[in-house]
Image (tube, helix red, strand yellow):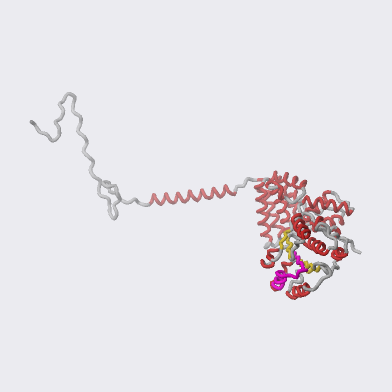
Amino acid sequence: MATQSLYRRYRPRRFGELKGQDHVVRALRDAVRSGREGQAYLFSGPRGTGKTTSARILAKVLNCEQPIDGEPCCECESCLAVERGTSYDVHELDAASHNGVDAIRDLIEKASLGTPGRHKVYILDEVHMLSRGAEAALLKTLEEPPSHVVFVLATTDPQKMSDTIRSRTQHLQFHLLPADTLAEHVRWVATDAGLDLDDRALEAAVTRGGGSARDTLSALELMAATGGDTSDELEFDEFVQAMIDHEPGRALTAVAHAIGLGHEPRTLTEALVRHLRDGFLSLMAPELVQLPQARVDQISASALEVGAPALVRAIERLGTAMVDMRHAPDPRVALEVALVQLTHEASSPDVGPLLERLDRLERAVLHAGASGTAAATTPAPPVDPATGRAVLGGRAPPPAPPPPPPPPPPPPGAPPPPPAGRGRA
């Protein structure tokens, strides 16, 4: 008999066991406690964050024989039947594979029938995959469902659903789990399951999980199967150190090692961009980095040596490399060229802006020289010296004769000359 996977063995059975979704727990528990539960819910969020699990817990508590403060007892026959998947009151439909009109019409016909429990709960997973015709068929039932029916729609992409469907439901959004919450949960699961793993293996499982509880437990199970071997983990610190020490060869060696472990060049580039983004955020907004605090401190120390401008430049250059990979015959070359440019840029001043400025100055000088030469070779129009105006259509008149020089001064002792214009008396 196959061993039950960790994420199924440690799947939450009550609302209080859900991790990192306090707002959802509070809304559902209060609705059940006060008897104001809705007839149509929409659960949206990334994969592995508890959408389907929450729907099953809601189905259990709505039909539980002895609910306790808005929580299922998990001991009565109704609760156990839901957990075994044999309950006549709970029906799950994978909308990704049953997305046609016929499947929805069959569901609607059965919804009007009675049920052994208090509520008949329909859980439609990946509901955004329904066809337009199926959505139209479901819409009328969502508007006026039978009094004993509750619909729970789960999706990872609510934007693909029609606005009319969303407007008929109570929309609860699920979030990725914080790294510290996942790290604590992983340590508890490893201890409870008797897994002999060191802190490095547990940290690798949290990093691989990417905020998803289910993916994290799957990664933890893989770590346990390999004896905690983390040799295939990407060592991004090598790339960052190559930028700090200006060593292109070190960066290329790290690329070769990663590809030798089986990582695709594009996947490697995407992971490197995420790592550099974490370094950039550790400088600007450390609370946004979804990693254990010890790892955040380590990344922040390296990011300080690189500097925020260099990190931004590296993210932009690697983003360009990912675009180039779409048409490159060998995507590895695009990554290697980008890393060599980044490690060289760190070791030499950025002369790009200086060259652009020099080019602009040269163009301005050439333009000014051309304008001056044109002005020097163009003859000026003749100017009338009497009026100071240019004479158009002919030559300028000859200049006027100069005025006569003033008379010489009289010798000493000579009588002054008579006034001008007067004769003898």
Please report the residue visible at 53 percent of the width from the left and 50 percent of the height from the top.
359
Give above or below for 35 relative to 423.
below
Spot the residue most to the front. 34
Q: Nearer the viewer, residue 191 or 138?
A: 138
Q: Position of residue 118 (x, y in %)?
A: 81, 67
Please report the residue visible at 71 percent of the width from the left and 73 percent of the height from the top.
137
Give above or below for 1 relative to 292.
below
Q: Which residues are magenta?
A: 136-154
Image quarter hosting the N terminus:
bottom right
Please report the residue visible at 89 percent of the width from the left and 61 percent of the height from the top.
3
Q: Nearer the viewer, residue 53 or 354?
A: 53
Horizontal placement of 382 versus 85: left or right? left
Q: Quadrant of residue 77?
A: bottom right
Q: Position of residue 400 (x, y in %)?
A: 23, 44
Give above or below for 55 relative to 347.
below
Horizontal placement of 122 versus 161: left or right? right
Q: Nearer the viewer, residue 188 or 370?
A: 188
